[in-house]
Amino acid sequence: MRKTIIFFGLILSALVLTGAGCQIGPFSFGGGGATGNDGGIFKTADKAESWTQKTQILAVGGAIKNFGNINIISFAFDPSDHNAIYAGSAGNGLFYSYDAGASWQQPTQVQGGAIRSIVIDPKNKCVIYLAVGNQILKSVDCNRNFVSIYQETRAEVVLNQIIIDSYNSANLFLGNSVGDLLKSSDAGKSWAVIRHFDNSIAKMVMNPLDTRKIYVATQDYGIFRTGDSGASWVDLNQGLKQYGGAFVFHNLILMDAKAESLLLSSQYGLIKSGDGGVSWTALALLTPPSGADIKVVAVNPQNPKEIFYATPSTFYKSFDGGAKWTTKKLPSTRQPTVLVNDPVEPKIMYVAFLQVKN
């Protein structure tokens, strides 16, 4: 049986985020134009009944700092330890915690730049990959040192997401802003383009039960699926055409790996597939179609009937597959960018935010 990691992260296509070289630069609190202290990471242990901000950094000498004013755009769990979590910022580099967010650290070499994607090797927790602007950084010593293993030479191209095959963790897949899907079969030493889509690759989702099955969501041209690690592809967009705005992508979740059920968040709203994207059905929300800006959505990994999503200021949750919804106020005025359930204890959730300039 094949398995892979649970990967989390959200690419906001409206942002123009850039990264520099391997020595990214010093950390500066409040970077990227952020103000206020309602950013960073928030955590709930009761399925969003209450939230606590988790942004403390234990500095040299025991001094406590925090990144409560920082914009967070990506998030990942260590697949071998759900208490080890990683958060990527929009301009202030990488943060990581080994105690479920109680305290955070920063790697010396990655204290600046926009971290769009983070993955941890499921067979070796000390191997970490980061998509930073136009390059991929890799650590093999648990964040102590990073080296650049891939650099995009086209100045206008951004690396949106990297994913890893847990069945064979030497296999990496990389999607960029011009629609190139690249694969490495040697842990990032060499790369080849295996498919070009005519639109930015916004998200890739790999089936944890069969890692040959990968869904690729483009920003505006719909969703595609491969069952053979990219050798051939199926267009899944026919069933989406009936929903206006469904091709404006926001997020994609694999709700049930065995059943190949998917949940798509788009400009239309939330749309569900129970057959691997062949057919689609819209969920009935409290807002009309195209009436909610749903950038983040999460599903309980142990119970796909529990669905959660967030819009600016409001958190929505359903415990019956989307038939009925309840709402709560979010703990920040910023745009939510990350929403995830803890894979081991799903009542624990994390949410992160981005300050959007008008």
Image (tube, rainbow, N blue to C red):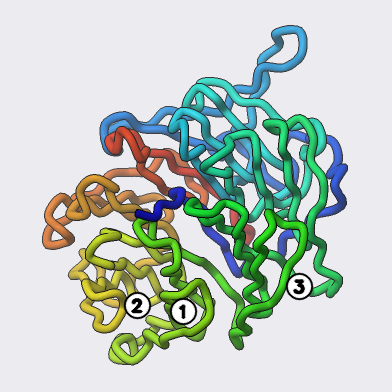
Quadrant position of residue 112: top right
Instruction: Locate residue 109 relative to residue 48 in the image: left or right.
Output: right
**How would you rate the neighbour count of disc 2 (Cα within 10 Å): few for under 14, some for 14-19, many for 20 or more?**
many
Q: Are marks 1 and 2 in contact (CB under 8 Å)?
A: yes
**How would you rate the neighbour count of disc 1 (Cα within 10 Å): few for under 14, some for 14-19, many for 20 or more?**
some
Q: Position of residue 335 (x, y in %)?
A: 50, 54
Instruction: Locate residue 77 relative to residue 151 in the image: left or right.
Output: left
Q: Position of residue 125 (x, y in %)?
A: 58, 35
SS category of the residue bearing label 1: loop
Residue reaching furthest to the top: 61
| In the foreground, 16 or 277 | 277
Instruction: Locate residue 50 relative to residue 180 in the image: left or right.
Output: left
The amino acid pointed to by label 3 is Val
Residue depicted at 25% across the width and 68% down the height: 287
| CA distance for labels 1 and 2 | 8 Å
Instruction: Locate residue 301 relative to residue 221 in the image: left or right.
Output: left
Pointer 2 residue:
268
| CA distance for labels 1 and 3 | 20 Å
Above or below: residue 51 compared with residue 65 = below
> If you read the primary sequence from the N terminus, does the residue marked by circle 1 or circle 2 appear first?
1
> If you read the primary sequence from the N terminus, does the residue marked by circle 1 or circle 3 appear first?
3
The amino acid pointed to by label 2 is Tyr
| Mark in front: 1 vs 3 | 3
Pointer 1 residue:
248
Pointer 3 residue:
157
Above or below: residue 201 compared with residue 358 = below
Residue depicted at 47% across the width and 42% down the height: 332
| Mark in front: 3 vs 2 | 3
Residue depicted at 38% across the width and 43% down the height: 330
